[in-house]
Amino acid sequence: MAYLNDNYLKLKAGYLFPEISRRVKSFCDANPAAAQRLIRCGIGDVTEPLPPAAIAAMRRAVDELSARETFKGYGPEQGYEWLRAAVAQNDFRDRGCDVADDEIFVSDGTKCDTGNILEILGRKNKIAISDPVYPVYVDTNVMAGNTGEANAAGAYAKLVYLPCRPRNGFVPEPPRRQVDVIYLCSPNNPTGAAATRGQLDVWVKYALEHKALILFDAAYEAYISDPALPHSIYEIPGARECAIEFRSCSKTGGFTGVRCAFTVLPKSVRAASRTGELHPLHPLWLRRMTTKFNGVSCITQRGAAALYSPEGKTQVRGLIGHYLGNARVLREGAQKAGLKVFGGVNAPYLWVGTPKGVTSWQAFDRILNEANVVITPGSGFGSRGEGYFRISAFNSRANAEEVARRLQALKW
Amino acid sequence: MAYLNDNYLKLKAGYLFPEISRRVKSFCDANPAAAQRLIRCGIGDVTEPLPPAAIAAMRRAVDELSARETFKGYGPEQGYEWLRAAVAQNDFRDRGCDVADDEIFVSDGTKCDTGNILEILGRKNKIAISDPVYPVYVDTNVMAGNTGEANAAGAYAKLVYLPCRPRNGFVPEPPRRQVDVIYLCSPNNPTGAAATRGQLDVWVKYALEHKALILFDAAYEAYISDPALPHSIYEIPGARECAIEFRSCSKTGGFTGVRCAFTVLPKSVRAASRTGELHPLHPLWLRRMTTKFNGVSCITQRGAAALYSPEGKTQVRGLIGHYLGNARVLREGAQKAGLKVFGGVNAPYLWVGTPKGVTSWQAFDRILNEANVVITPGSGFGSRGEGYFRISAFNSRANAEEVARRLQALKW
């Protein structure tokens, strides 16, 4: 008899974004006129065309595939050397971080990588996540068998939830107890908070002292506008011994549809076997990627490399400036509407308190029905997300301005 | 303390193809002149340009990404509806197989899918694989913890190996004992054998009787030239209750560099929870894909859909005819060289017996050093692959002819 993975049966309801899609579709079907003026600020998906440098590079890549002499078949599973080198140089060594080319693993998404990394880790780890948190961290741990059952509030047994709230600036502090694997996301999805050097330093010290591993999701680092904030965990001394970093081209070059991300796994990061012997994780991840992955589309990799050309960099800065401009417009609009707003300065997300007595999903339904705007209910990110909603700044300027107006017109 | 996945420490040496790359690189570095005339028939990678229909569609897709009005961000994780519908109609319903659009899951590779599918299965399953076999099936089961340690011959405890040899035409028979999950690959990599309807019927009956699950890898189905052979497991009555099928655009459209494959998971396939209750696997795989995957590049999906257009189909047939023509040339050459040859008729692979007393890796080294041709040693596919080597027919016609000549010139 074939057996299934029982851990999947512990998962609660649908994954957040499919559930939002379902509600939006049902609203649009029932209200075709309102559907016409719908503005989506829910899922964090980019809206602007790709940078011209990436388009030009991908056109050339398609052309290469049309002739035998320039045709490309299987590439290295970890990514082409020219892309790994461009990433290591521009994103890390140019910022003073000691990262070698072969510590970069090119992949098709940070969502995939943060889930797949659990494959090379053991089942005895005590896992710490923020609350609120990007739901994928939780769900992939449930699937992997790292949790018990969920309670009525949706919190899973065995996970250690680290509360993020106004009083800690939505950046979690290390717990007093031992945890073995810690997810940190900065700039944060969903709260838009960015960790300071001091806050990351506390975490790296904790990890070194407790032989813990930090999974550092920096998919939004390019949105940091405060020059004092670190962009990479490797700006913190000691991080090369205890941290794996995840980056993405989704929110820099707008690659959500063409799929490119990367994981940085320093050769000095180690974890223990069952017998307590320390082994580097780099060879395990290399083995995982060469065995279970076939590399990113060569067209996409050409496009990603072009983001690191001089024109590409300028164009990416332009795109990010555009979305951060939207964030400012939305922030001001929400504040004028009398709402309490966090984030939106070093991140493309605003984290907005709901009016008193209004739950996250109630706010979602009100904003959908009355303002015809899709946001993301905070409770979808964990129990401490209740009482908030997330507004994504990924949009046209005209839409951002319109959403700002509609938020102000809404009577709670 | 962070713990690693100890199962990775059970893995033997490098994965086969990286090991071949290492030996070839070291030969080329030492023999620059011979390196000039090197012909690669090792890894099964295509060499011919993509079909013009796919190129045109991917050019249009890149153009779409350059304008706000036509820009595409995140697509559905399971693939665009237009691609799932084209696959289900053309590859299945047109052949009389009952497969719904939403039973197709578009992915970035069959290697990825056959590995990832283990995530939704339990750890109590007794796994059966052929010997010889595509190494990924074995390695991913080791990583997932479905095996014990390897013995000196490289065979893993707890796996059930099904011998493939001349006397069964290299198609395994069901074992007498209970197994829960069975990998079948037809047309086969590496042996080139294709299962008959009768042979698959025996397997489906076994699976239904033993409540077992068949993982059917049909990545090479387009190479079947004998009209009596089934292309899909769903041509066999009962397979919709017990089989998951894997297909790829890698060897049809030549998509090894642009990455597109798909998995067919009928809603009627079920597996047992720990308590013995049967659940459909479709919702688990849907959850896995929406949570841990972000979909295939939209450019690639446009290219894949074009393979199903009338011009695309003709061009794919042309490509496959080309590679099968190479297989015929290589087959005749190897036979004239006095070698015993299997496969190469319904598959792009030839499975060739080494001369008496010559091991697979000895044959690899001889053919590399003396003929400057890269093949794949049979023992890399399992202990019953010893005494054979695989020749890939993916090449230009001129190279195939040259390899046929060199094989004949080689004195053993």
Image: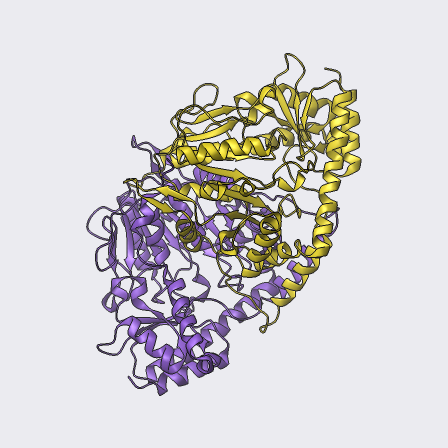
Chain colours: A purple, B yellow
Left or right, residue B90 beside residue A318? right
Instruction: Estimate the x, y position of residue A287 in percent, counting from the top left.
Output: 48, 37
Q: Quadrant of the C terminus of chain B?
A: top right
The image shows a total of numbered marks equal to 0
In the rendered view, would you say B104 is above or below B224?
A: below
Q: Quadrant of the N terminus of chain B?
A: top left
Instruction: Estimate the x, y position of residue A397 in percent, counting from the top left.
Output: 49, 79
> Furthest residue to the top?
B357
Residue for point 58% across, 66% down: A50
In the rendered view, would you say B280 is above or below B302?
A: above
Quadrant in which residue A358 is drawn: bottom left
In the rendered view, would you say A290 is above or below B374?
A: below
Q: Is residue B48 visible?
A: no
Q: Is residue B186 visible?
A: yes
Residue for point 50% across, 76% down: A396
Residue A24 versus residue A271: which sits nearer the camera?
A: A24
Residue B262 versus residue B66: which sits nearer the camera?
A: B262
